[in-house]
Image (tube, rainbow, N blue to C red):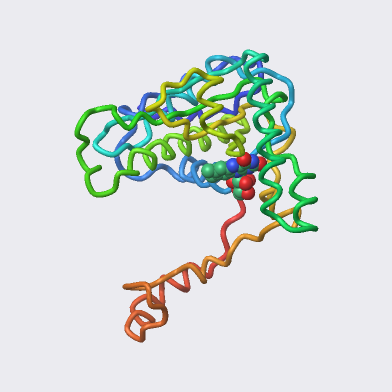
């Protein structure tokens, strides 16, 4: 039995219970649900401006559970989730951010340095809850599939982050990733053991808006690259004659406009 009711949660509203994944048929989703997935992907934003409303615990629980269902190398599930509401802890993280933001400004020449310093790049104190997602490389002993590429545990953790980010979009919750933080100090503030890597420090809350474009694009910092420039066919070397012919229909499909979700 498919539960067609995928709700947008509003703060304080009764929270829906989504049908467990096991009950969904394995074939492709019905149109409306498929559109919902793409809508989450295309309208997800990194959020730095939050409304003060808290996130209902049931919504928060769904988001963390979505993260826990991300793919992981050898199914090692290297992640832990540190949920932070305590303002005193968040103030310490915010101090760390302010110091690091200042230090990082030296990497830019003027006028970019001033622009960098003027941009809002976090919502640590404004968002009602912060979440640090970590990676424990020692989990699961010898990990199936990690022998060749050691970083696959970190990649797995990032997959968990993205699951949460997309689920949050569907719930109307905004997520902002703050990476302008020195990890040893962050470890210290949060009491993270030395062998565990803090991968993502996230701010979660209801956004002032989900803007149609990334903030960095709107402010002229950097544009989205044309996807056409990033495509290679049957190898890195672009433009091989056979590839041109074999991939023509795909290229035509790529050229079609992204539907407006
Ligand atoms: C690994 C990672 C680290 C990021 N760190 C920051 C950050 O410290 N501050 C910030 O404002 N945005 C940060 N972002 C958000 C990016 O700036 C944002 O994803 C990008 O500009 C595209 O915008 P969008 O997410 O709204 O599509 C980070 C994103 C990722 C994936």
- Ligand 1 is found in which quarter of the picture? top right
Q: Is residue 239 visible?
A: yes
On the rendered structure, is 15 left or right of 215?
left
Which residue is located at x 63 percent, y 33 percent?
174
Query: In this view, which residue lies farthest toward the bottom?
Result: 241
**Vertical side of 51 occupied by 260: above or below:** below
Q: Where is residue 212 in the image (x, y as percent from the top left)?
A: 69, 49
Q: Position of residue 40 (x, y in %)?
A: 54, 41
On the rendered structure, is 247 left or right of 208?
left
- Counting every numbered tag in the picture gives 0
On the rendered structure, is 227 left or right of 1?
right
On the rendered structure, is 111 left or right of 216?
right
Q: Position of residue 206 (x, y in %)?
A: 67, 27
Q: Which quadrant holds the N terminus? A: top left
Which residue is located at x 58 percent, y 56 percent?
259
Q: Where is residue 3, by image quadrant?
A: top left
- Between 89 and 4, the one nearer to me in the picture: 89
Q: Where is residue 71, by image quadrant?
A: top left
Q: Can residue 45 be seen in this view?
A: no
**Vertical side of 233 occupied by 54: above or below:** above
Q: Position of residue 129 (x, y in %)?
A: 61, 21
């Amino acid at each position: 039995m498919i539960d067609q009711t995928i709700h947008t949660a509003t703060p304080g509203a009764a929270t829906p219970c989504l049908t467990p994944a096991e009950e969904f048929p394995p074939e492709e989703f019905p149109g409306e649900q498929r559109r919902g997935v793409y809508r989450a992907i295309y309208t997800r934003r990194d959020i730095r401006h939050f409304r003060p409303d808290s996130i209902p615990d049931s919504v928060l629980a769904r988001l963390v559970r979505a993260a826990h269902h991300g793919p992981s190398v050898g199914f090692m599930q290297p992640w832990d989730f540190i949920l932070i509401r305590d303002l005193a802890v968040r103030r310490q993280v915010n101090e760390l951010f302010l110091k690091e933001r200042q230090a990082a400004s030296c990497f830019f020449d003027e006028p970019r340095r001033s622009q960098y310093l003027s941009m809002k790049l976090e919502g640590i104190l404004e968002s009602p809850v912060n979440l640090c997602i970590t990676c424990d490389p020692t989990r699961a002993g010898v990990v199936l599939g990690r022998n060749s590429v050691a970083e696959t545990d970190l990649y797995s953790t990032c997959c968990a982050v993205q699951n949460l980010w997309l689920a949050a979009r569907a719930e109307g919750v905004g997520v902002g990733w703050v990476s302008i933080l020195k990890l040893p100090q962050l470890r210290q503030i949060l009491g993270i053991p030395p062998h565990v890597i803090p991968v993502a420090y996230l701010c979660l809350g209801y956004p002032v808006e989900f803007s149609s474009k990334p903030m960095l694009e709107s402010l002229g910092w950097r544009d989205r690259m044309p996807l056409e420039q990033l495509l290679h066919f049957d190898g890195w070397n672009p433009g091989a004659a056979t590839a041109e012919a074999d991939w023509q229909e795909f290229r035509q499909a790529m050229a079609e406009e992204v539907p407006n979700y």
